[in-house]
Structures are given as structure tokens and as C-alpha cells.
Image (tube, rainbow, N blue to C red):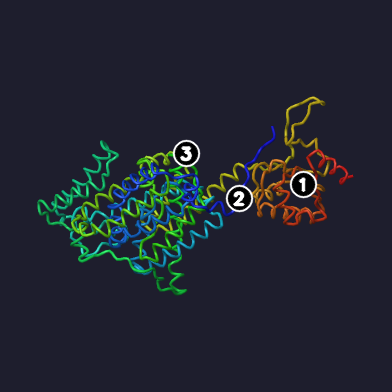
Amino acid sequence: MPHVTSPKPDNWALFVPKLVTVLKEGYDLRAFRDDFIAGLTVAIVALPLAMALAIASGATPDKGILTAVVAGFLISALGGSRFQIGGPTGAFVVVVFNVIAQFGYDGLVLATLMAGVMLVAAGVFRIGTFIKYMPQPVVTGFTAGIAVIIASSQIKDFFGLVMAHVPAEFFPKLEALAIAMPSAHLGTLAVAFGALALIIILRRYRPTWPGFLIAVVFAAVLVQLFQIPTDTIGSRFVGLEPSFSMPALPAMSMERIIQLFPSAFTIAFLAGVESLLSALVADSMTGRRHRSNCELVAQGIANCGSALMGGLPATGAIARTATNIRSGARSPIAGILHSLFLLAFMLVAWPVTAYIPLAALAAVLVMVAWNMSEIDRFRNLMKAPFGDRIVLLITFGLTVVVDLTVAIEVGVVLAAVLFMHRMSEAVEVQAHLKLIEDDVGDDAPRQRGEPLGEHDLPPGVVASFIKGPFFFGVAMRLGETLDRIGPKPRVFILNLEGVPLIDGSGASAIGTLIERCERHGAHVILCGLQNQPRKVLEDMNIFDDAHVSVAPDFDAALTNSRELVA
């Protein structure tokens, strides 16, 4: 049967929001009812999380809900996934806290805006197709590191410690917390442990119930009923009222943009990776398919919108997206309704947030940190090959001790170097010289690509066979092969029939080989070229040299070599 390929969609079709697709397919009252219930359920889950994540990031709790409203609406309305729920997530806590500490909240707004522009550009240039190939040890390493930092940042509120200042660095922070531990408040500790225990119990026996919200409400009632002297949102953020200002651009200068570029890149990277991971999880749960680059564009627009409204960075939230699906969501309208429900809460019921104990929100974040740590995946990766374990541990350690941006950069580079090493080990470069073969009959056919013994080659002719992708990680080995040859040959046959692809470094290495052979009066014959290597070598003018020729296969190259030697 002839091979049938699916027609490629038009470029614009790749960026059509899933909301448009759903509405074209038909949307009825029953689907709206399912989306209404799912949106309300997710809003109930997102409410305490948004406030807790904002406080942990060094912002006020209203900024978390504002972000879930603005960014959540835009991600659902414009995104490439049917079920994605957007908002603030734990992945941003570390970088947001550091940006606010160094550059103030205005600096965070500008960094978020820059990250949004980067995400839109990444989607337009189709980078979303490649982000999903991020090495798992890197993702697990920095995610587990963020979990450790989030958990350590909640110790103060969890135990009710009296501290004038909490150091940002990890080990000084632990030292300061240990010194302040005698000031722990038993009432605050009881509230925190009670909330955490209730979350764990509900997750075990009533997993469909909104455990975070129930625990926070229970803790607030307990504090008011028994008049427990512990910090609440109302006492920590006196007179806080949510505000919806008109969109405005932050103050910008080239110097400030350069200063914030690393942080903006980290925000964009985290948003891209987590949103696409969340979309993949949604696909696996529903059997649907998302559009990666459309999702990145939506994430970028959502972050720009959040920044212009004074909100925090946002991305797709895996846990909230899974809750949306389990609650029966049918379309992106569920995510839009989730944002509208949160907006209604801010407009109508905001005053009740003043009674929420910070210890209860600390318990929520401790649970979030535990979920982020993915301890089972971390433990499983520790059984992986040695190189993967090193990448995992270094990324994790740098995230905790140094900086998230540095950890991601070093982790990705180490993973790339590890990949290159493994590929270079997999690529075979064989010099067919003085090989010992078993005796065979005169009529026995030689297999295509089989190594040749010295008696098969005319005097003054040598041959090498490359098997596997020929890229910059192994290009140097071609020169090593030539160095192992004793007397300089008159003809050098390079058999490339086992090379499916070649990059610029590999092509340059072949060009260097041709130059070296030319200096010694030798002719180079390239044989067995597949389509991609042939095009690369043609584009780089490798065939223009008078001392190189091309043969369709090794037998033809051998015939040509005999004529050249004669």
C-alpha cells in the first residue's frame, strides 16, 4: 500500500484557540452545565492557593487572586488546550520573591511583561514543539529544589516564630530559623498542624472534596471561636482592599531591562515548561491533543495582561487542570467560569479573607511543596544512569543553594553535554585497515556496509565507515581516524551510508579531512550519501573541491579508487 501522509495544516490554523474549535463543533446547555460545575469546583480549589502563593512570593494575597482572574481568563480563552487552568503556581515562588526583593514590585511587573513577550515570540517561532523535550532530571531537579525552598519559607508562619528578618539564602535562613525556634507559639502550631492534618485526611478519604478550602475555613473558625492569638491576613495586611486599576505600562529603561532579563527568561522558561507539561497531562487524561505553540502564545498574552493589571506571573497549573477534568469539564469555558467565580469573590466576599490564619495558608503551602517534590519520581531517577543522577543532584542543589536561573542554565548545559557524550559513544568511526576476518568462500556475497579487510582494498587506498548521526560531538573522531593511518594513502574512501543526518560541525570535519588529504596528494571519495547529509554537504560547498568525488555506494567507490590509483 502507498504511504499516506496527513496534510499539514495552514500556519494560522496552528494558532486558533481551542475555544473557537469547541464552539465550531457545537456547544449546548448540557455542556455549559458541566463546565459550570467544573469551573466552580476549580475556583474553590484555586482561591486559597492563589492567596497562599502570593504571600509566599512576597506579594499581597489580592495579587494572587487578581492573577488567577486575569491570566486564568486569557489562558482559557486563547489557549491551545481544552482543559488548561491558568494562574499563579509554586514554580514561580522563588524567582518572584527574589525579583521583588532586588528590584521591587515594579521590577516584577516589568519582568513578567518581558516574559510574556518572550513566550509570544516562542510560540510564533514554533519553539513550543521542542520545549516538551526538556530532560526529566533537569525538570525534576529544579522542581524538587523549589519545593524545598517553599517548605523552608513557611516554617516561620507554621510555627509562629518571632523574627524581624528572614534571610533569603537557604543555609543562613535555616540558621536563623533554628535560633528563633524557642519563640514558637503553641496556638499557631496547633492551627497549622490541625489544618495540615485535615488536608491529609480529606485527601486520603474524600479526595473529591476541596481539602485546601475546607482546612482554611476550619482554621479560621477555630481561631475566632477560641480567640487564638495568631497572625491572620487582616492583621498582617492591615486595611488591604483589592483594586482593579486600569492597565498601565511599568517604568522602563534599557539598563533596567538588561538587569531583569535573566529573571524574565527564567519566568518565561518556567511558564513554558509547566504549561506544556500540564497540557500533556490533560491530553493523557482525556485522549485529546493540545496545540503547543498556540498555548505558548496564550501564556505570553496572559502574562502580559497580568503584568499590565499589576498581577504576578502565571502558567498552566497541573493540579488545578486535573481537578477541572475530574470535575467533568467539557471545554475552555470551564476555565473562563473559574476566573469569573474568583472575580465575584473579590467583589463580594473579600472582607472575610481578613479572618484567614497565616498558619493555615502555611499548611496549604507545605502540602503544595510536598506535591511538587515528586519524591517517588526523584527516588526513581536516582536509579538512572550515573550521568542522569549527577544532572538531577546538581540542578537540585543549585536551585536550593544558589539560584533557580543558574540551576536551570547549568542543568540544561550538563544534560546537553551528557547527550553529546552518549551520542558520540553510539557513533562508530571505523578505519578499515588490517582487519582480521573469518575465512569465507570466493562466491560469498559481502553485506552492504560490512567492514572490509586489507586484501579488499587496492594498494594506496584506505577506507573508513561512519555509522550514526555525525554531529559536532563526534566530528573530531574523524580526524583521529586519519591520524591512526600509517603511510599516507593516495585515495581515502569515506563510507557515509550509515549516517542518517549531519550537522555543520560534521560537514566542516569532512571539509578539513579533504584539505588534509589534498596537502598529501590524496583524493577523497564520499559514498553512500543519504538525502540530508548530501544536501548539507552541497550547501556548504564540500563537493566543489577538485580532490573530492561522490560515488553512489561502496562498490562504485572501490572501482573509482582503482582507476585513480592506476
Does the residue at mark 2 contact the one at mark 3 (Cβ under 8 Å)? no
- Residue 382 position, x and y percent, is 41, 41
Tag 2: residue type? Gly
- Badge 3: how crowded within 10 Å, few (<14), some, or many (20+)? few
Does the residue at mark 2 contact the one at mark 1 (Cβ under 8 Å)? no
Mark 3 vs mark 1: in front: 3
Q: Is residue 512 left or right of residue 200?
A: right
- Which mark identifies residue 526? 1
Query: What's the residue at 15%, 50% (across, down)?
Result: 221
Helix, strand or loop status at disc 2: loop
Check the image and report above or below for 288 versus 472.
Answer: above
Helix, strand or loop status at disc 1: strand
Tag 1: residue type? Leu
From the image, tell me which residue sits under label 2.
Answer: 473
- Residue 542 position, x and y percent, is 75, 55
Question: What quarter of the picture does the C terminus occupy?
Answer: top right
First in residue order: circle 2 vs circle 3: 3
From the image, tell me which residue sits under label 3.
Answer: 287
First in residue order: circle 3 vs circle 1: 3
Q: Is residue 440 left or right of residue 67?
A: right
CA separation, marks 3 and 1?
Answer: 47 Å
- Residue 353 position, x and y percent, is 22, 57
First in residue order: circle 2 vs circle 1: 2
- Badge 2: how crowded within 10 Å, few (<14), some, or many (20+)? some
Outermost left residue: 226
CA separation, marks 2 and 3?
Answer: 38 Å
- Badge 1: how crowded within 10 Å, few (<14), some, or many (20+)? many
Outermost front residue: 29
- Residue 562 position, x and y percent, is 86, 42
Check the image and report above or below for 376 versus 148.
Answer: above
